[in-house]
Amino acid sequence: MIKLSKLADYGIVIMTHLARPGGLQASAQEIAQATRIPPPMAQKILKALAKDGLLRSQRGVKGGYELARAARSITVAQIIEALDGPIAVTDCVDGAPGDCVIESMCPARTNWERINTAIRDALEEVTLAEMAEAIPVAFRRVDDAPAAASRL
């Protein structure tokens, strides 16, 4: 089974929350509460996303986290890579030296690279704005306004 890590999954949830129309800046506590992600995990994710330049953070009473750039310019692939590192279905396609003893003569490696490229390209094609647009009505805030969609 190919599966996202919980960290990447929660990171996408947090980023989607921050990209919603009307969403400006929120504290780690507000984000954790709104997304129902445990606060320590939310804080860890927020720090990693800020360190990678996807979020901006501001300290102080009026501080919090916000998107560092428009949601349409952030991809799902960028969020995953900020939290998990390179997207790779096998060790031999992540670019790092691996422990595979047959890597140099592996008959499946070329196809693993094709598969990995297809997955990465698909994740690169989906923007955060698209993720935020797909939020079911039941989960939208009452104050979500169509005019705020320009933020996307």
Image: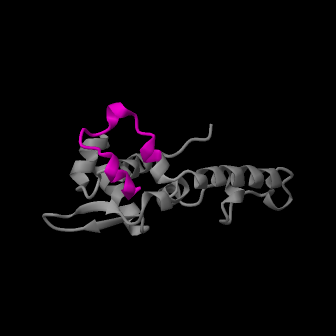
| Residue lying at the far front of the rendered structure | 147
> Can you give x and y, in whole percent of width and height, for residue 102 in the image?
81, 56
Nearest the eye: 8 or 18: 18
Where, by quadrant of the figure, is residue 110 drawn? bottom right
Quadrant of residue 151 in the image? bottom left
Quarter of the picture containing the C terminus is bottom left
Q: Position of residue 139 (x, y in %)?
A: 33, 35
Residue at the spot 34% in from the left edge and 58% down from the top edge: 46
Pick whichever, 54 or 69, lies toward us.
69
Q: Is residue 18 visible?
A: no
Residue 139: say if magenta. Answer: yes
Residue at 22% of width from left, 49% of height from top?
Answer: 30
The extreme left residue here reads: 61
| Side of 125 where 10 appears, left or right | left
The image position of residue 112, as x and y in percent, is 76, 51
Give the quadrant of the N terminus.
top right
In this rendering, the answer to whether 74 lies above or below 7 is below
User: Is 138 placed above or below 89 here?
Assistant: above
- Residue 77 or residue 148, whichever sits in front: 148
Residue at x 24% of width, y 38% of height: 142
Residue 23 sits inside the magenta stretch = no
In-front residue for pair 51/106: 51
Q: Which residues are magenta?
A: 131-152
Residue 149, position as x, y percentages in the image: 37, 51
Left or right of 137 on screen, residue 143: left
On the question of residue 2 being in view, the answer is yes
Q: How is the image coloured?
A: one colour
The number of numbered discs placed on residues in the rendered structure image is 0
Residue drawn at x 36%, y 33% is 137
